[in-house]
Amino acid sequence: MCGIVGAVAQRPVSEILLEGLRRLEYRGYDSAGVALITQGSKLKRVRSLGKVAALTEKLAYEPIEGKVGIAHTRWATHGKPAEYNAHPHFSGEDLALVHNGIIENYVELRERLGELGYTFSSETDTEVATHLLDYHVKKSASLLKGMLSARQEFTGAYALAAVCADEPNTVVIARQGSPLIIGVGIGENFIGSDVQAMLPVTNRFIYLENGDVARVTLHKIEIFDAAGKAVERPIRESKLGDSSIDLGEYRHYMLKEIFEQPKAITATLEGRLAQHQVLSCLSGLNPMAVLAQVEEIQIIACGTSYHAGLIGRHWIETYTDIPCHVEVASEYRYRRQPKRKNLLLITISQSGETADTLAALEKVKQSQACLASLTICNVMESSLTRESDLSLMTMAGPEIGVASTKAFTTQLVALQLLLAALIQAQQGETPVSRQLVADLAQLPQLVQQVLALNPVIETLAERFVEKHHALFLGRGEQYPVALEGALKLKEISYIHAEAYPAGELKHGPLALVDSEMPIIAVAPNTALLEKLKSNLEEVRARGGELYVFACKTANLVPNEQMHVLELPPVPDLLAPIVYTIPLQLLAYHVAILKGTDVDKPRNLAKSVTVE
Ligand code: G6P
């Protein structure tokens, strides 16, 4: 993934670049580096292993300053996390490059560049790109022309930013597949992987298209498309406030984001519910006319967003006659798909930049295999919203913690809004669509009630610290809730956790059950409650210790082997959203007790813009 930031200004930029990197750390935090054109047009860099804080500390001892520069925070793909693999990479003393993405043909390029006399000091594909750029810059005597030629030779996905000592007031950038945005200032300009990185210095942005190359100087921005033709791209003003990423009173972003859920859900519902119906919640051309024609639905997503899709399928198939399929994008994109009639393709993504999800959308669009594409997304100007015919925005606000929380619950809210809109478009207002609207209106308050369980869950977490494994169980639409609970626990506490549909236990996982294996179950009072209870008995009979988040009315009697945490009664349709909350809190408190880096767990990144 990696995060990129750059600046061309008339003032010192190292602090601007460091702040940009801090805001981009969600994209990776294995190592970080900065390269600046210093006085006398000398290119200098400082790199360090670990997070941006380590780079900041190093810069305090080895200060460098300049008015033009690029910086990078890395998530290792080629080459282990190490200072020598950290960006910016140099070719000679005069050219520096930062890169987000993967240059797939780097092995051939490395061989060719070796024959040309280039030597390598890292294991990265980025250093190969740097030398190739240098080769073309020398040939054309221009950083821009060099980039235009070099990019013809790259295959893969990339966002690149380069500076060169011979052109000291210029940053040249290129985008193919990975996000890259220009921040437009007054007498200064910036580049970054996202808008947040540049919000302290500007709120005007140009979104590059795939294939674009741009030369950014103090007063001028020149953009060239994939064919090398000069093009104009619109400047958009961002409405995002700069304060939205403050930690406030919270110790971690994850906890803050868990507690923000009532507000995020309210914002996602705002202006979209009338007394008995869902009002327009989709942007794009004729959304209701499109929904009226839908005969089949395919949902594509990754990670937590995929779990939201699984719950969405359950709802769609329960309340309409529209068949709905769900698949992780990394599989879907490489699989032959049978032709389907009037297919609505739904992508779900917090960031809107996940490479596999974008590629899957691209594939379906190219084969013209769908009636329309719709994205449920949290970032207004993201690649997915720009590439999709229709968008339904979740209004969760920026989510910084790598483990997704409020993005997930607002995705579920968006799926319910979509379900109601779909029913309204195909059948008009029905008892189900009316029920959906009535239920949704009470959701923020129910979530608030469940958040009050926080102290109880904090105490419960102590029982998990010494455990190495955990099993999560659910049935029906609660099975994806269990999947999400297990994902949260493994992501941030590093405890191995798996989820099973409770009815499937007897076909294998029951063999794992003993007194050392905690089993967490979600038990709202739905039609499958009695079935779940029998499954829990199977566990108890094998000496397993159960932790059940259950509805007050479920009549589950606690005993030595079964701890019951009661939740208020909730309408069936809201149960997956409400029952997710205690599982988020459990994962958070276990991680705290284990002393892990909750907001930036090892080896992970928030936005995965590589395959
Ligand atoms: C990463 C994040 C997950 C997220 C997934 C999909 O793996 O760590 O939290 O669910 O990407 O991201 P998206 O932005 O597409 O929802």
Image (cartoon, rainbow, N blue to C red):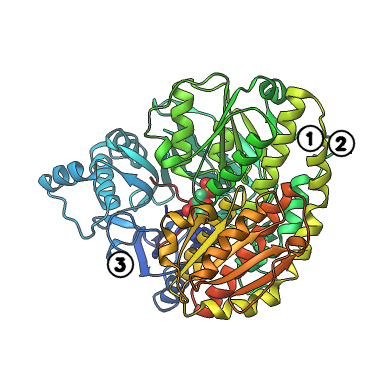
Which mark is first along the chain, 1 or 3?
3
Residue 245: quarter of image = bottom right
- For label 2, the residue is 276
Depth check, front residue: 147 or 503: 503
* Residue located at (73% from left, 50% from top): 574
Task: Kindly identify the residue that appears in the image at 23 percent across and 43 percent down.
Answer: 135
Neighbourhood count class around disc 1 (C-alpha, 10 Å): few under 14, some 14–19, many 20 upward: many
Q: Residue furthest right?
A: 275
Q: Are marks 2 and 1 in contact (CB under 8 Å)?
A: yes
For label 3, the residue is: 82
Q: Nearer the viewer, mark 3 or mark 1?
A: 1
User: In this rendering, does residue 39 appear at all?
Assistant: yes
How far separated are the C-alphas under marks 2 and 1? 8 Å
Disc on res. 433: 1
Q: Where does the image place residue 158, in percent across and percent down from the top left?
A: 38, 43
Badge 3 density bin: few <14, some 14–19, many ≥20, Cα 10 Å: some
For marks 3 and 1, give the CA distance. 55 Å
Q: Is residue 300 above or below residue 572?
A: above
Q: Quadrant of residue 430?
A: top right
| Between discs 2 and 1, the one toward the N terminus | 2
The kind of residue on which mark 3 rests is Ala
Distance between mark 3 and mark 2 Cα atoms? 58 Å
**Nearest the eye: 227 or 495:** 495
